[in-house]
Amino acid sequence: MEEGISIDTYIDKLLTECKKGNEMYQEKLYRHFYGYALSICRLYTYSDHEAVSILNDSFLKAFSSIQKKGYNNSIPFKNWLRRILINTAIDNYRKNAKHNNYLQIEEAEHLETNTNTINDLTAEDIIKLLDFLPETHRLVFNLYEIQGYNHLEISSKLGISESTSRVFLTRAKRKLRVLICENFKEIYGR
């Protein structure tokens, strides 16, 4: 980033040059938002490789849109990019849906969770635990709990009913509770 200018001015300059198709500025924009974008994409995949693939597809869509229509700065660029990242992750899910296996989560007995155990969780721990969820459960959990979508929006995006979205969220939370208890007993002997 150039010294002496605000972050907003810097982003505006990058976007102006990206509209012209300037690859050097596209790379700068990509690098500037890479960490943020990767963290969003990783929530929706089981592997870093697949997350990077979604990230790259998202940036291609963003650059194409910027060049064709220009970026409408009525919403912050970061929010606009986030929407593209999530939609691309959902598209990736749909494309691979035929390969998804819908595992039934067995009924878990009610387990008491130690609040201190949950407070000990790091972001890395949570992402590792999310990797144990079936793909659809993980997707619904991320859209609802992390991105703030409601069940109507999720059902529309994924082509499922609202009640199915609720069921997947409930099952994801149940499985996460079990995983938290199992993993912390194993790691911390609690």
Image (tube, rainbow, N blue to C red):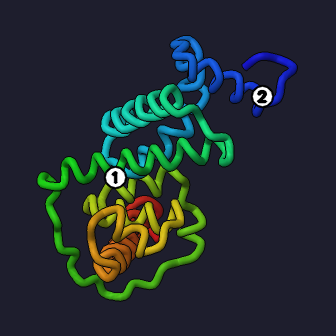
Instruction: Indicate whether 36 appears above or below 128.
Output: above
Of residue 38 and residue 89, the one placed in the foreground of this image is 89
Report whether residue 100 is seen.
yes
Rendering coords of residue 64 (x, y %):
44, 29
Quarter of the image where one finds residue 102: bottom left
For the residue marked with disc 2, what is the amino acid?
Answer: Thr
Quadrant for the N terminus, please.
Answer: top right
Residue drawn at point x = 27 percent, y = 66 percent: 159
**Depth order, front residue of 187/178:** 178
**Residue 177 sits in which quadrant?**
bottom left
Residue on which the image places disc 1: 90
Label 1 or label 2, whichever lies nearer to me, is 2
Closer-to-camera residue (70/62): 70
Going from N to C along the chain, the mark reached first, 1 or 2, is: 2
Q: Which label belongs to residue 104?
A: none
| Quadrant of residue 28 within the rendered picture | top right
Q: Position of residue 104 (x, y in %)?
A: 18, 74
Query: Is label 1 in a helix, a strand or a loop?
Result: helix
Badge 1 vs badge 2, beta-carbon distance below 8 Å = no
Q: Residue at x 49, y 67 (%)?
A: 149
Q: Amino acid at mark 1?
A: Ile
Look at the picture and state if 3 lies above or below 42: above
Res. 178 in view: no
Cα separation, mark 1 vs mark 2, equals 31 Å
Q: Residue at x 36, y 48 (%)?
A: 89
Q: Which residue is situated farthest in the right direction here?
A: 4
Task: Quickly name the residue at label 2.
Answer: 9
In the image, what residue occupies the spot 76% across and 33% down?
A: 8
In the image, residue 15 sits, relative to residue 98, either above or below, namely above
